[in-house]
Image: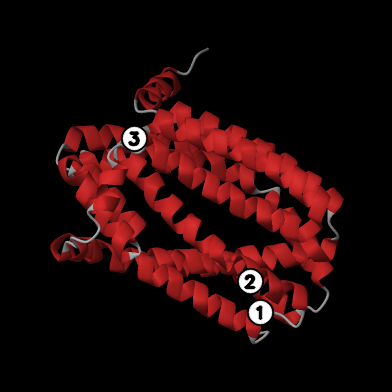
Amino acid sequence: MVNIRLVNVVCRLRSIGFLHIFSSNLLVEILAFGSQFFVAWLLTPEELGYIKVFQSFIAVYVTFSLLGFDTSLLVLGASDFKHRNRYLKSALSVLIIPIFAVILISTALAKLNLYSSTDVVNNLFICFSIIIFPQVYNRILLVDFQGGREFKLIAKLQFISKAITVLFIFLCTYCYGIYGYMLSCLLGFFLTGCLFLKHRKNIFSLFLNFSKFDFIVAKKHWTIAKFSMIDNLINIIQKYLDLFIINFVISDKAQLGYYGFALTLLIPYDILLSSLQQVLIPHFCASIDQKMKVTHLLYAFLFSLKYCLRRSLFLL
């Protein structure tokens, strides 16, 4: 017998764009999962460990460089759609300084061999710390699209960029090994940024007016961002703390490679929750003054999360 509540919730989620985001994220993770198996076949366990160390530190650097402005942009852009361009311009302007400061610090630490006693790991940071730049701006542009509730466009662009990036990974890793893999990731992030810029309306007019910095909007951003930055940093460090400890305590990076690859098997469990967050948070922000609408959205979120947990426990 059909569960009427489930059908109603699915219809509700479909109407706000959830199914587009979820299907896109699912396809993206399938592609990413396949590419991980391919990379594991081409690279040694030690090299997989080196990549995991690099990705872990870069995730923390990206989170710090964002300064919580991704959260503030999502909240402000979704709740005050009329001034969405002003909020985006302010975020893009403010983050230039922390991005390049963090890149310089990351490179300096690598030159001092503080990441690892292995030269390969330090060389990755010296050559590819620039990857922080596209990751930060891609995140800002992504939440701008979320704030505008352009979920179909997000799904389309994410899938296209990921599919092309996987092709880059196959080709570059096969030809150049671990450095080819990192180069393909860098190219993939820049490709994603180009796609976002191409489809963001009025983006070039924002760049032309960069000289006019709006301190009032920046202060409004910081009122929200400062709390989000602390929370995001704690969460990201907690997420990768085990990898940091393993990196400094265990000299055999092959063990880190095995452990990092095992973690990729758990990624599918995050797809539903992350998809729900992508879609529902902008709606929460935009409907904060409409109690009934927020209640319905919250019900849809909690019911979907409950259903997801039940399915996960069943699979386990």
Q: Residue furthest top?
A: 1
The residue beneath circle 3 is: 299
Mark 3, secondary structure of its residue: helix
The residue beneath circle 2 is: 125
Left or right of residue 278: residue 175: right
Mark 2 and mark 1 residues within 8 Å of each other at the beta carbon: yes
Distance in Å between CA atoms under marks 2 and 1: 9 Å
Tell me if mark 1 has few (under 14), some (14-19) or many (20+) residues whose alpha carbon lies within 10 angstroms of its own: many
Distance in Å between CA atoms under marks 3 and 2: 44 Å
Measuring from the top left, give residue 124's x and y in whole percent. 68, 69
The first of marks 2 and 1 along the sequence is: 1
Q: Nearer the viewer, mark 3 or mark 1?
A: 1
Mark 1, secondary structure of its residue: loop
Q: Residue furthest bottom?
A: 112
Q: Is residue 209 visible?
A: yes
Camera-nearest residue between 255 and 93? 93
Q: Residue furthest front?
A: 208
Q: Nearer the viewer, mark 2 or mark 1?
A: 2
The first of marks 3 and 2 along the sequence is: 2
Measuring from the top left, give residue 154's x and y in whole percent. 44, 35
Mark 2, secondary structure of its residue: helix
* Res 218 → quadrant: bottom left
Q: Which mark is residue 115?
A: 1
* Res 113 → quadrant: bottom right
Q: Residue at x 60, y 71 (%)?
A: 241
Camera-nearest residue between 5 and 225? 225
Q: Nearer the viewer, mark 3 or mark 2?
A: 2
Left or right of residue 46: residue 152: left
Left or right of residue 231: residue 207: left
Q: Residue at x 40, y 45 (%)?
A: 142
Tag 3: amino acid: Tyr
